[in-house]
Amino acid sequence: PPPPPPPPPPPPPFETTSSADPASGASFAPDSATVPGEAYERKKERAKLCRERMSSLFEDLARALVPHDPGLRQSDRAAVLSTAITAIARLTSENNALRAATGGVGGGGSAGGVGVRPPRASASASAS
């Protein structure tokens, strides 16, 4: 019997150069993300900016909710969100009641709201 064919040659090592025309001015330098620590620092900076933006938005939301809940602590994000949900649900309900009272005149369409789900009915309210 004939001997088995030789194994295929190993793949060439990874090359950082390209077959592009060097006169094009393309840079073949490795990405800065390959330098240890730089990617981590960029990630930390993006996370910091995200936290700052979220904090700013929570402060804006808390200030907007002061008329609805004067004792609201701006540092309590769960309370800010809870108050916002309650205020949006109440305003949506008032909006729907006003639309019904006016026969829908001046409404912004037949959606019956502003894209906000109505509040969940409690178990005691749905039993009656």
Image (cartoon, rainbow, N blue to C red):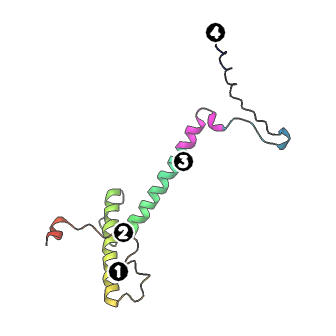
Q: Secondary structure at mark 1?
A: helix
Query: Is disc 2 surrounded by few (<14), some (14 to 19) or many (20+) residues within 10 Å?
Result: some
Name the residue beneath numbered marker 3: 46
Farthest-out residue, front: 1
Q: Along the horizontal axis of the image, is 36 left or right of 17?
A: left
Q: Is residue 76 visible?
A: no
Q: Dominant secondary structure of the magenta stretch?
A: helix
Query: Is disc 3 surrounded by few (<14), some (14 to 19) or many (20+) residues within 10 Å?
Result: few
Q: What is the x, y in percent for residue 25?
A: 82, 42
Query: Is disc 4 surrounded by few (<14), some (14 to 19) or many (20+) residues within 10 Å?
Result: few
As shown in the figure, which amino acid type bears the numbered disc 1?
A: Asn
In the image shown, does 56 or 10 lie closer to the viewer? 10
- Please give the range of residues in magenta: 32-43
Instruction: Determine the image quadrant of residue 118.
Output: bottom left
Alpha carbon distance from label 1 to label 4:
89 Å
Q: What is the x, y in percent for residue 79?
A: 31, 60
Q: From the viewer's perspective, is residue 7 above or below residue 78? A: above
As shown in the figure, which amino acid type bears the numbered disc 4?
A: Pro
What's the mark number on residue 1? 4
Dots 3 and 2: beta carbons under 8 Å? no
As shown in the figure, which amino acid type bears the numbered disc 3?
A: Arg
Q: What is the x, y in percent for residue 100?
A: 32, 86
Mark with earlier residue (3, 2): 3
What's the mark number on residue 47? none
As shown in the figure, which amino acid type bears the numbered disc 2?
A: Leu
Instruction: Determine the image quadrant of residue 1.
Output: top right
Instruction: Determine the image quadrant of residue 54.
Output: bottom left
Name the residue beneath numbered marker 1: 95
Mark with earlier residue (1, 2): 2
Residue plotted at (40% across, 71% down): 115
Alpha carbon distance from label 3 to label 2:
29 Å
